[in-house]
Image (tube, helix red, strand yellow):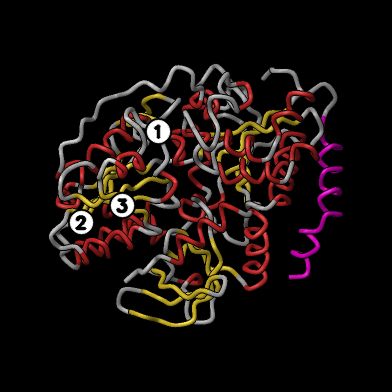
Amino acid sequence: MCLGIPGLIVDWVDVEHHIAKAEVSGVRRNVNAALLVEGPDAVDVGDWVLIHVGFAMSKIDEDEARATSEFLAALGDPYEQELAELRKSRIE
Amino acid sequence: MKFVDEYRSGDVAAHVAEQIAALVEPRRRYKIMEVCGGHTHTIYKHGIEDLLPPEVELVHGPGCPVCVIPMGRQDDAIAIAERPGVIFTTFGDMLRVPASSGSLLDAKARGADVRMVYSPLDALRVARENPDREVVFFAIGFETTAPSTAVTLLRAREDRVRNFSVFANHVTIIPAIRAILGSPDLRLDGFIGPGHVSTVIGLKPYRWIARDHRKPVVVSGFEPLDILQSVYMILQQLAAGRSEVDNQYTRVVRPDGNPRALRAIAETMELRTTFEWRGLGFIAQSALKLRAEFADWDAEVRFDVPGIRVADPKACQCGEVLKGVIKPWECKVFGTACTPDRPIGTCMVSSEGACAAYYNFGRLTRRRNREPASV
């Protein structure tokens, strides 16, 4: 459950509450980016982030996102389960 | 970023393994604890121990949030879930954890409204959608997850969502490491520090381990090569007689962590005087509860919870596994009475649990053949 899943921020849904739309493995879901709004780690559309339980926790670069996705895909079940749970998520 | 690709290749793994072997001093044994269950998973999934010289042993630590919740708290969760009118929301990992009278899934089968959520914010949405029900979120996790609960609480207060509350079971990693270092059962040489916890807390909280206990700490990423490189960095320090806090996972972890996440935790939660950990017993100031200002959203204030301490099943040695005192396959019920399909202890439930990791990746036979039962 401590997995950080790479996602690409593609849009802002609710700027006031830092809710962004992120694309993860072909699926678009809302995530909360309130923890990444300061200094060099502030995120915007076009940035890659590691997502944990619906929150963007770390800003990463594209190469790191790609490599992490490959690593997670190789994990098999735990990653599939996490993605299945993410697909059901409807954060507001 | 070409370096990253090279760094991830098999050739480099072999090269790092050679460098590790070159640092090993004759007749010296090294015990390195990987604190985080995510690391444990990688180590067994990818057979990292096969690449290490026999003198270097990896010891699994307590960093599995599902594993460390004691049975009494799981009983409390079920007691809340079975109250009339309650919708009990939880991460999927907690559904199958055995309590005194079955798991949350068993409670659901008996009629309790137990729902799996991906995020605490999904639990808050369930509360908005069901204004006539009490929606409780079972909050577990180390500092990686606590900020998510904190931000959700701030949002619940801002939006005045009154039928939402949190059953807080967040734990903090540093007191657990302190307890392990104080235990006479185990002599350790260094620590592989948790990667995602450190994105929140940064590097400073580990300094006392290097300073007072003279043990290196290297915060590590989750890929096989991250872990190999972290082992190398620890052995380098030991060879040079140094003990420092180092960061192998610089591509994600900042030295100061995430100040905003720490502020969100501090605004909503405070340290409990003490908290019981499975296997480690009661550890002072090792867990978080909601601040008095958030009493309206605190499930422990809003509902009576039994709060009874329950001993672990006698056959289960999850506690010793969590302390690194025994290996999963040294437990009497491992792989026989206790399997991922029918777990007795939490270490067999979570994919981050050492027992589940051993079981799933077929290490049982190999380890028994290679290494007689000894610690």
Amino acid carrying label 1: it is Pro
Q: Which residues are magenta?
A: B1-24
Q: Is residue B214 above or below residue A2?
A: above
Mark 2, residue position: B164
Q: Where does residue B221 sit, x and y in percent of width and height?
A: 63, 52
Other residues around mark 1 within 10 Å, as few (<14) / some (14–19) / many (≥20)? many
Image position of B183 (left or right of B188): left
> Which label belongs to residue B98?
1
Element carrying mark 3: strand
Quadrant the C terminus of chain B occupies = top right
Amino acid carrying label 2: it is Phe
Q: State which quadrant residue B306 falls in.
A: top left
Task: Say which residue appears at 31% left-offset and 73% top-offset.
Answer: A17
Amino acid carrying label 3: it is Thr
Other residues around mark 2 within 10 Å, as few (<14) / some (14–19) / many (≥20)? many
The answer to which of A64 and A92 lies nearer the viewer is A92
> Which label belongs to residue B89?
3
Marks counted in the figure total 3
Q: Is residue A61 above or below residue B256?
A: below
